[in-house]
Amino acid sequence: MSAVAAISDASADGRSVTPCKDRDASQLIDLFDAMNQAVLERAPNGSFLFKNTPAEWFRILSKEAEITDGRIELEGHSSYLDHFLSDATQWWSEGGAGWLHSGTWLEADAVGKDWPFAARAISRHGNAMLIIECVAEDYEAQVQLLQAAREHLLNEELLEREVHRRTAAIRQREEEIAIRLLAAAGMRDEETGSHVRRIGLFSATLAEALGWDAARTADIRVAAPMHDIGKIGIPDAVLLKPGRLTQDEFAIMKQHTVIGAKMLGDSDIPLLVMSREIALGHHERWDGSGYPQGLRGEEIPLTARIVALVDVYDAMLHRRVYKAPIAEAEVIATMTAASGAHFDPALFKVFLRILPALRRITASVQE
């Protein structure tokens, strides 16, 4: 026989547990007392009969309700318990199986201290039973656990913020180093300074549209401006020549891709690895007619394909020593015609979709 069934049988005549002389029942009463639980049976009139001696803490829950012949009216003293008893009454009438749990709630004593309680409604042998317990120790342990978890999450959040802050600072330093490296290479005049900044922002915007994560997007923002770093090795007579280059001069100019790759090579730092593949591959073409390796299609690293697009877009839009600026409508028409030959056609579609964002960047980073 279960503990609850034994108690129910012991009180079938409606008497309190006090007259019960059965040894097993007495042991069960002692057990419930030791477990700090109040066990009650619901009478037909809605009152409750104690099946064990109510602990002192029960007064906090029942306030000043009178206990007469082991009976008590529970309703009207705790709004939370009233709601639970309403649910329990329906549950008992429907013959609910197992038990109905109230969850933990708090009641304040006379001095304002909160006490946590929990209740279970059960049904055994046709008797509606209610078990109420003061769960102070468990509740305190749960609160401490939750507080520890909260502090852990706060510390994690603070740590994450610090990581983001430091990462942003590192990115800023990396970008500044890249710009200063370009300046040292003689590439930091008003024209190319604005150009390389726009290339970095254009590339990051396109990468973000492709679904890249934040770290890789930040890498290409810093790496893309170094696409022409190899021009440090190109003579001024070729590099700064106004107008078209001769065939021999163009052959010299094409070497800036190889020079840049050598400058940025031999590193396992992700940013420099990306910078190298951009420097080497941003003049490759989708149809294989580019340089220096004549790569075709997806043989060309995606980073290089991205920079190839935005580099041509920006170079055509702005004045250079060898050309006047071109209107955007004409630039887009020319690039559209080159999609699938010069440019990755799928990437070009994404490029067209983000043109409004690129225009905003252009407006904010002027020559």
Image (cartoon, rainbow, N blue to C red):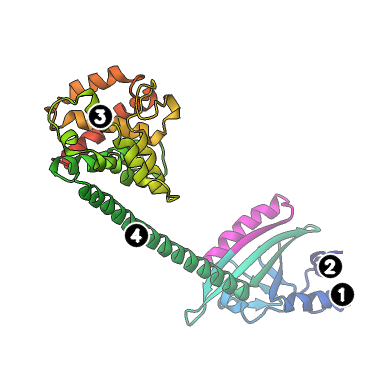
Discs 1/3, front: 3
Q: Residue 55 falls in which quadrant of the image?
A: bottom right
- Answer left or right for 304 relative to 113: left
Pointer 3 local density, CA inside 10 Å: few below 14, some 14–19, many at least 20: some
* Mark 1–mark 4 distance (CA, rounded to whole Å): 67 Å
Q: Name the residue tied to disc 2.
A: 6
Q: Which residues are magenta?
A: 79-103
Expressed as whole percent of the image width and height from the top left, the position of residue 169 reads 31, 58
Secondary structure at numbered mark 4 = helix
Q: Residue at x 48, y 82 (%)?
A: 111
- Answer left or right for 305 relative to 112: left
- Answer left or right for 107 relative to 209: right
Is residue 98 located in the magenta-colored stretch of the structure? Answer: yes
* Mark 1–mark 3 distance (CA, rounded to whole Å): 92 Å
Residue 45 or 309: which is nearer the viewer?
309
Give the amino acid at mark 4. Answer: Arg
Expressed as whole percent of the image width and height from the top left, the position of residue 361 reads 21, 39
Expressed as whole percent of the image width and height from the top left, the position of residue 9 reads 84, 66
Q: Name the residue tied to disc 3.
A: 312
Q: Name the residue tied to disc 4.
A: 165
Give the amino acid at mark 3. Answer: Val
Q: Name the residue tied to disc 1.
A: 24
* Mark 2–mark 3 distance (CA, rounded to whole Å): 88 Å
Mark closest to the chain's N terminus, 2 or 3: 2
Mark closest to the chain's N terminus, 4 or 2: 2
Q: Residue at x 24, y 19 (%)?
A: 334
The reply to whether discs 1 and 4 touch (Cβ–Cβ < 8 Å) is no
Discs 1/4, front: 4
Secondary structure at numbered mark 3 = helix
Give the amino acid at mark 1. Answer: Asp
